[in-house]
Each structure stands twice: as structure tokens, then as C-alpha cells.
Amino acid sequence: MKKTAFITGITGQDGSYLAELLLKKKYQVVGLISRKYNIGFHNIESFKNQLILKEGDLLDKKSLEKIFKTHQPSEVYNLGGLTFVPTSWEKPTLTFDINTLGVSRLLEIIKTHHPKTKFYQATSAKIFGQPQTSPQTETTPLNPVDPYSVSKAAAHYLIQGYRDKYNLFAVSGILYNHESERRGPEFVTRKITLQAAKIKLGLAKQLVLGNLKAQQDWGYAPDYVEAMWLMLQQSKPDDYLIATGKLHSVADVCQIAFSHLKLNYQKFVKIDKKFYRSIEAQAPVGNASKAKKILGWQPKVNFKQMIIKMVENDLKLLKQGKKL
Amino acid sequence: MTKGKKVLITGITGQDGSYLAEFLLKKGYQVYGLTRRTSTPNYERIKDIVDKITLISGDLLDQHSLSHAIREIQPDEVYNLAAQSFVPTSWSQPVLTGEFTALGVTRTLEALRIAKPDAKFYQASSSEMFGKVRKTPQNETTPFYPRSPYGVAKVYGHWITVNYRESYNMFAVSGILFNHESPRRGLEFVTRKISHAVARIKLGKQKKLKLGNLESKRDWGYAPDYVEAMWLMLQQDKPEDFVVGTGKTYSVKDCAKIAFEAADLNWQDYVETDKQFIRPAEVDVLRADFSKAKQKLNWQPKTSFEKMMKIMVEADLAKEKKL
């Protein structure tokens, strides 16, 4: 019998890559579509007809229960949520209601009606905030510094609580930044690759950025969704940190993207303080040795390869006349 | 100068809210309390001061009611003491606990940020945030590891308070209070459950007392001592977080022994243990290192554990005799 996986946030970057991975592994894939907070279907357009898409919302427990009842998923990946830090300052209560209480709602359903179902929670490295030790591991103390990160930290603890109290197979994957051709244009890597491609084609003149020295541990999203799946195939539920262990700056992204297009980024980049975050987090960098040892996981695509893939894809989309 | 200052307390009908209101009235504050409309109002703990305070209808679940209250009152200080505060209930109602205990903080901070950003804000944080403790004793820098939806919600409330302080420069502080008891403690909490049972057994109204893990230890202080620490935190020049506790731990067994002795009874004759009351994912030993509060607030507990248990037993005896 085919295994069924239920993915929240299926239209997002990670959800769409994960859906493709699971389809290849012969899963039946059910995706949650929120009517209210839908970002559109562009990420899943090419394989949408192979998916079962169900309307519902992390804010609405009944809608989730119905999906569980109909499809009896053996694996649930909770990737849905409000993910952009500046928005979390504008909507702090909604951020918590979706990102944290959404997890409570799912765990309650699993606990009550589907205790065998395995649950993956998408946790962000932002829960470490400005970490006091570097690199971070699964046991580094949390120190979140914005409503998004606080909501994710609270959800992370809920997973541990439900796992210990009810023996559920619930795990939290602490993923560092991961980018791809499907990253939203509000995130800095995609903002850069897209604008570089526009400049190359004469569609734009400059690129306005915040702090060029800001660094991140950036990995490639398709590599990271594989780690999610691996976590649910273990005999014991446990939390894992997923990262590349390497730091690159915003300037590095610009350098790779523009020079791939034979442009000098310094001629096009303008700095605007408005893009500095109110508290700019120190660069977290992850130590994924537990994932390497137990899951046998490691990143396959390196930083430079990833940025080049992103630029080429943006160039291709723009040449096709896509409005981006 | 505290005379004429305005203060808003959420959770004013609870143990801490009622003691704090009394304390602030003595200091000359104008005290406002946020209360939820319920079909049977419970003003038991504030019945002696209800004429001296102003109760405003509002709910932590309702942003509009909070914004309205803060706009109208223009408080100088706000103490957020309201919460769904009972750990076992947080397991049966985890979503509501989050809505109330965690999001209530964000809603209050949002209301202040917009309508009264220079007000000082106190958030009631809890030692339950340490949960599965990483080290003992715990101070302001000990990592959190909450073990229940209540603990998780409190951690969220703590961090969001720190976030608003750091990002919006608000005078917002989090007081990490270890367990604190009193004759006004709810009957669902073990110290009060014991003192209440002792009084009833003494008066022949009850025969046995069922308890969970007798070895379970806590750092238990006296609530009236603790509300003073809350107030002191808001009188500092700089907003900072503080741990408040006694630094001493006693077991449930110690608690029973002292309480029964206070009524000239032997606890072993009456106490039975019941597995039903043993919490899963039970927290480890919580013990406060309150040296920062001692140093900067010049605060320390005044009432010993033995004295507190005696006060509680006597209060329950007096109450039960009247019934």
C-alpha cells in the first residue's frame, strides 16, 4: 500500500521540493492549501495534478481533522507558517497563532486520533538568535530575538514535550537558511539573483541592499528536504540540526551572482539603512555532525553552485517574459 | 513619588494580583484591574479592597479590549499576572493556554506600544520555564527547557517581553518567579491542597489526603514577599529581568509534615499516594539563585517555609470553622 504524506505549506519553497521528493518515492502526497494566506501555485505548477490539494488552515483545527480523517497520513510535515521576520513584527499575534498554536492543533489531532503518525516540525536556526557559542548544535541554548523566532522556539519545545509525554514520533528539524530557485523574492539571496538578472537584461538599473557584511549559513533547499524525510525514517524520534557549517556574506552572494553574468556588483549595489533589521542577528553557523552520523546526510550542492543555479533560472524566467 | 500613579493589573482576582493590589494601594497608587466577565464573578480574594480599586472589563484574548483599557487609563505601570496557570490544564487545553498565557503578553505589549509606550511593563514569568533543568540552581542566564504547554507559553511570553524591550526600547521586564504560595493559593496547587486538607481533617470533615510524588521538590516562597519584588523591578533605572525565589527546596513530604504538625497531627496517619497525581515529564529540581535580585533590588524573602505553611493551615482552619 502507498504511504500517504500530508504537507502543510506545500506551495512554499520547501513544501514543493519535498512534495517532488515524496512523489518520486511513490508516496501519495496531500497538501494543505490555505484560502486566506495563499502565496499562489507557481512552485507546484508542473506537478500539481499528481497532488491531492485540500483546503484548510493551521488556524482551523476542524479543517485539519477532516484531512487526517479522510487521508490517514502516516507522515506529516509541518512546513506552513508565517516565515518572514519583518512581517512577524507587524503581526506578532498572528505569527504565534499560526506558527506555534498551529503545531499544538496538529499534535492534538495526532495524539487523540492518529498516535502512529510521524510528525516533522520545521524549526529555524533563528531560534538561536545571537548565539553564545559557535557553531551551534542540537543542545545550544535558544535565544530568539524577534516574534517569528520566538514562535518557532516555542513550537520546538512543544514537540519535545509531546514526544516525551505521549511517546509520539514527533521531531524538530533545526534548519539553517536554505535557498533555491523557488525562494521568495523578499529573501536576500533571491532578491540579489533576480535583480542581477534584470540588470543584465536591462530591466533594472540598481540593487538596493542593507548590510552587505551580514553573514549566513546558506544551504540548498532540495538537499534540506531530503534531511526532513530521513528524520522520519529513523527508528527513534529525535531532533536534528541541518546546516552547511560555512558562512557567506551578502557581498559574496552579489559577487557570485553578478560575476556569473560578467558584471561588477559594486557598480550596481546601493546601500539603504532601512533594510537593516532592528536587531541584526549575529551570524549563526551550524554543526550538522549528528545528522551526518545518524542520518547519513550531508549537503550536495555548494554555495557557489547554488547561487549560479538561481541566477540562471532567473535569467531564463525573465527571458520567457515572466513578470517577477 | 508613587502617589497618584496609575497602575493596571491583569489577573487582579488571583493570588498575586490581589496581594499586589493591596501593596500598591498602600503605596498610594490608583489601582485598576482587568477582569473578564464571567457568569459567576469570583472576587473572593479582592473582597476587602474592591471599593478602593477600579475594575475594567477586558480580556487577554481580545486585543481591542486591552487597547481600549490602556488608552483610557494611561497607566504608568502595567503588571501582567493573568494566565491559564495550572500545568495539568495546559495539557488538556494546550491551544487555549497558548492563546491566553503566551499571546496575551503580545497583545498587551502591542496595546502599550501603540497607546502608552512609556508605561512600565511587568511580565509574570515562571520557574516552569526551566523545566528539565540544565543546571542547579537557576539564575537569569540559565537556558530554558520547558516541559509543558504552560511552560512553553511562559517562555514565549518571556522572550517576547525581552524582544519588545530590545527592539522598541520599552521598559518591559520579566520576573522569573519560583513557586509562591499563600492562603489565597488555588486549591489545585499542592501546598494549598495540603493546608486545606489538614484543616478539614482536623475538623473531622475529611479522613484522608491523596498526593502524587512525595519526593518531588520545589523552591516555595511566600506570595506577599514576591509581589514586592515585582514592584521593585519597575522602580529601577534600567529594565532588567530578575529571578525571584528562596534558594531552598522542600519536598511535598516536608510540606505535609509541617502542615499536619501545625494542627498537632501526624501526616503519616492521613497521607496516601496516588499515581494519578504523578505528572509525566516531571520537571527536575528547581531551585533559585536570586543573587541578582538581592544585589540590585535589595530584595530577599522574609517569610520562611515553615512559617508560611503555618499561616496557610491557620487560615484554612479559620475558614473551615466558619463554613
Image (cartoon, coloured by chain):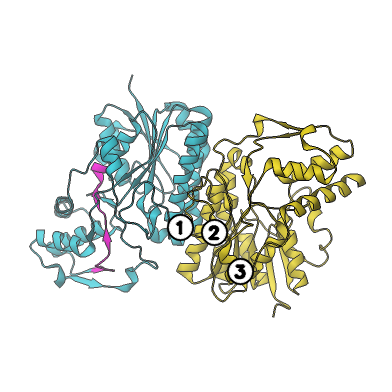
- Do labels 2 and 1 touch, CB within 8 Å? yes
Instruction: Classify B62 as above or below A162.
Output: below
- Label 2 is placed on what type of residue? Thr
Whether callout 2 and callout 3 share a subunit is answered: yes
Q: Point out which mark residue B106 bears.
A: 2
Horizontal side of A248 relative to A200 (left or right) equals: right
- Do labels 2 and 3 touch, CB within 8 Å? no
Residue on which the image places disc 1: A147
**Can residue B323 be spotted in the picture?**
no
**Chain coloured cyan in the rendered structure:** A
Horizontal side of B48 relative to B221 (left or right) equals: right
State which chain disc 1 sits on.
Answer: A
Magenta highlight on residue A221: yes
Label whose residue precedes the other's in the sequence (2 or 3)? 2
Secondary element under disc 3, as helix, strand or loop, is: helix
Please state which of the two labelled residues, at mark 3 or mark 1, is closer to the viewer. 3
Q: Percent position (x, y) of residue B216? A: 62, 41
Q: Percent position (x, y) of residue A177? A: 29, 52
